[in-house]
Image (cartoon, rainbow, N blue to C red):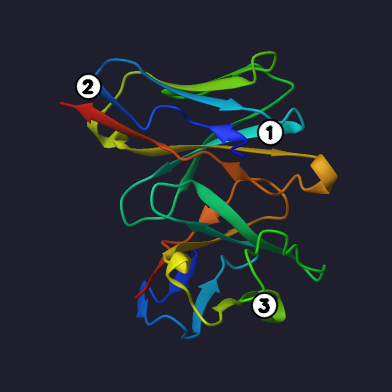
Amino acid sequence: DQQVKQNSPSLSVQEGRISILNCDYTNSMFDYFLWYKKYPAEGPTFLISISSIKDKNEDGRFTVFLNKSAKHLSLHIVPSQPGDSAVYFCAASGHSGGSNYKLTFGKGTLLTVNP
Amino acid sequence: GAGVSQSPSNKVTEKGKDVELRCDPISGHTALYWYRQSLGQGLEFLIYFQGNSAPDKSGLPSDRFSAERTGGSVSTLTIQRTQQEDSAVYLCASSLKNTGELFFGEGSRLTVL
């Protein structure tokens, strides 16, 4: 039972264009969402987060959008750069049973930005 | 170092052997997590430590898995009688209490033959 789904295993975009990575979740108790980025042979690194009280959070080239009614969030990267090529994981946590610290991760999307 | 340190980085073992994986969290981080990533899968929660509280072991897949955290710092994940399905990258992370912004180590890649 996958509670966090990233349906696109991979995405390829041209340098300078927008990258849009999507994530869907099923658990309505989730109220905090994060994106992590992972390079090969490294651990994931935190990128950006959003609380369920917001529908948008922006940090430089990265913006996360949250649509609670659709249980959907997306990460936009504008403009995309070759160094953004990595696996992006969507993660969620909630107050279900007090486990607001336990992140549930999707399977990841491999982003390739072509020069 | 300034980051989360894990050892060994790679471990190859035979089915049935015990293994220990070590994690040194970032100094001052009170929360410590173990996750694992099997091939083609997302990160699977295993166990969580927060200060002196009882750990949340709800993600451990079987009683062959155990973990401890000594002195509120270093943690060891032990897998007894390893099976081939235990092959994965085991990731440790730490954070300042319950922020959700986890700092991950590079992981320990376990291969069970």
Q: Quadrant of residue B63?
A: bottom right
Q: Amino acid at mark 2?
A: Glu
| Screen quadrant of the C terminus of chain A | top left
Q: Amino acid at mark 1?
A: Tyr
Residue B2: where, in percent of width, then height? 48, 64
Q: Are marks 3 and 2 in contact (CB under 8 Å)?
A: no
Q: Is residue B61 left or right of residue A23?
A: right
- Which residue in the protein does label 1 denote? A32
Which residue does the image show at 37% across and 76% down from the upper left? Answer: B11
**The numbered mark 2 sits on a residue in which chain?**
A
Between discs 2 and 1, the one toward the N terminus: 2
Circle number at residue B96: none
Q: Is residue A114 left or right of residue B38?
A: left
Residue B82: where, in percent of width, then height? 49, 78
**Label 1 secondary element:** strand
Q: Amino acid at mark 3?
A: Glu
Residue A61: where, in percent of width, then height? 41, 23
Q: Nearer the viewer, mark 3 or mark 2?
A: 3
Crowd rating for badge 2 (residues with CA inside 10 Å; few <14, some 14–19, many 20+):
some
**The numbered mark 1 sits on a residue in which chain?**
A
Which residue does the image show at 66% across and 28% down from the upper left? Answer: A26
- Which residue in the protein does label 3 denote? B68
Crowd rating for badge 1 (residues with CA inside 10 Å; few <14, some 14–19, many 20+):
many
- How far apart are labels 1 and 3 at the CA level? 28 Å
Taking depth in this image into account, of B113 and B41 the one nearest to the observer is B113
Residue A103 lies, with reference to residue B89, above or below; the image says: above
- Which residue in the protein does label 2 denote? A15
Q: Is residue A98 left or right of residue B59?
A: right
Q: Quadrant of residue A9?
A: top left
**The numbered mark 3 sits on a residue in which chain?**
B
